[in-house]
């Protein structure tokens, strides 16, 4: 009788259990797969945070990718929430600048501080790549997959998964604080617009502006 109950439980929740395992496996592989340098880390992210979740959605769960943010979505809602997102995120950044140790502990590569072209390349290719990958995995894969059952709470679930991920990997630092800010507002923007596009663009703008402000008022004022 006990075996039958366990079997019925597994059959009922097998998709949920399998998906949870896939999510954890992707994060574990991204974290522990041996990489050297930024380019290999980006490549690792593309494979484990981007390609694997997409393949799982399309070929295992047989879902349509447009339901996971791969569409234009509601562009009016996307633009409105992107504007709100950017405004509130910059307000939080202001608070971090003036009332915490964030300016002293936020780390940027020395090479981008005095060279605009290095700065631009760093923001567009490295920061942009990770911003896109975090959108695809945490908002597109985790949040929108949970949304049909969890509803609005899926926004909080993906945020706390990222928070837990940083904590477990010992990356819960001021340097990663901006990614936690983007997670909260990106989740809401993606949830409302049903598209990854607007949250990604807003995230990238926020991260570029933040890095520029840190260089201007912290590094160049030393």
Image: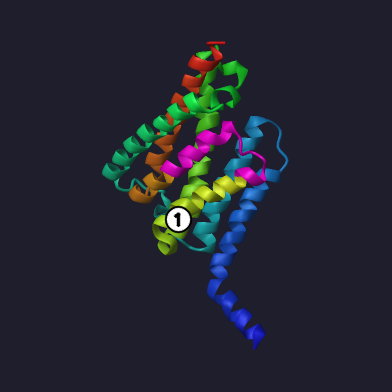
Category of crowding for the residue at label 1, using alpha-carbon neighbours closer than 10 angstroms: few (below 14), some (14–19), many (at least 20): many
The secondary structure that most of the magenta stretch takes on is helix
Note whether 41 is above or below 48 in the view shown.
Answer: above
Q: Secondary structure at mark 1?
A: helix
Of residues 130 and 182, the one nearer the viewer is 182
Q: Residue 81: image x %, image y %?
A: 32, 41
- Tell me if 196 is positioned left or right of 121 in this view: left
The reply to whether residue 206 is visible in this rendering is yes
Q: How are the colours assigned in the image?
A: rainbow
Residue under circle 1? 154
Quadrant position of residue 175: top right
**Residue at coordinates 56% horizontally, 45% vertically from top-left?**
163
Locate the C terminus by quadrant.
Answer: top right
**Residue at coordinates 51% horizontally, 26% vertically from top-left?**
123
* Magenta-tinted stretch: 166-185
Q: Residue 103: image x %, image y %?
A: 54, 23
Q: Residue furthest front?
A: 99
**Residue at coordinates 62% horizontally, 80% vertically from top-left?**
7
Q: Residue furthest left?
A: 76
Of residues 143 and 62, the one nearer the viewer is 143
**Residue at coordinates 33% horizontally, 48% vertically from top-left?**
73
Of residues 117 and 91, the one nearer the viewer is 91
Q: Residue 146: image x %, image y %?
A: 47, 59
Q: How many marks?
A: 1
Q: Is residue 14 magenta?
A: no
């Amino acid at each position: 009788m006990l075996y039958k109950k366990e079997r019925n439980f597994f059959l009922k929740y097998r998709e949920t259990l399998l998906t949870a395992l896939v999510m954890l496996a992707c994060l574990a592989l991204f974290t522990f797969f041996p990489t050297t340098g930024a380019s290999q880390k980006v490549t690792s992210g593309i494979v484990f945070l981007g390609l694997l979740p997409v393949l799982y959605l399309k070929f295992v769960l047989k879902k349509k990718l447009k339901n996971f943010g791969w569409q234009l979505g509601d562009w009016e809602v996307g633009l409105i929430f992107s504007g709100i997102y950017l405004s509130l995120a910059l307000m939080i950044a202001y608070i971090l600048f003036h009332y915490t140790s964030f300016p002293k502990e936020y780390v940027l590569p020395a090479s981008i501080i005095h060279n605009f072209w290095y700065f631009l390349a760093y923001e567009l290719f490295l920061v942009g790549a990770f911003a896109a990958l975090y959108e695809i995995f945490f908002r597109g894969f985790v949040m929108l997959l949970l949304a049909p059952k969890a509803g609005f709470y899926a926004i909080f679930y993906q945020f706390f998964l990222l928070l837990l991920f940083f904590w477990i990997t010992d990356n819960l630092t001021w340097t990663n604080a901006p990614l936690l800010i983007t997670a909260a507002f990106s989740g809401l923007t993606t949830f409302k617009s049903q598209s990854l596009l607007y949250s990604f663009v807003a995230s990238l703008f926020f991260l570029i502006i933040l890095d520029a402000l840190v260089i201007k008022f912290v590094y160049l004022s030393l």
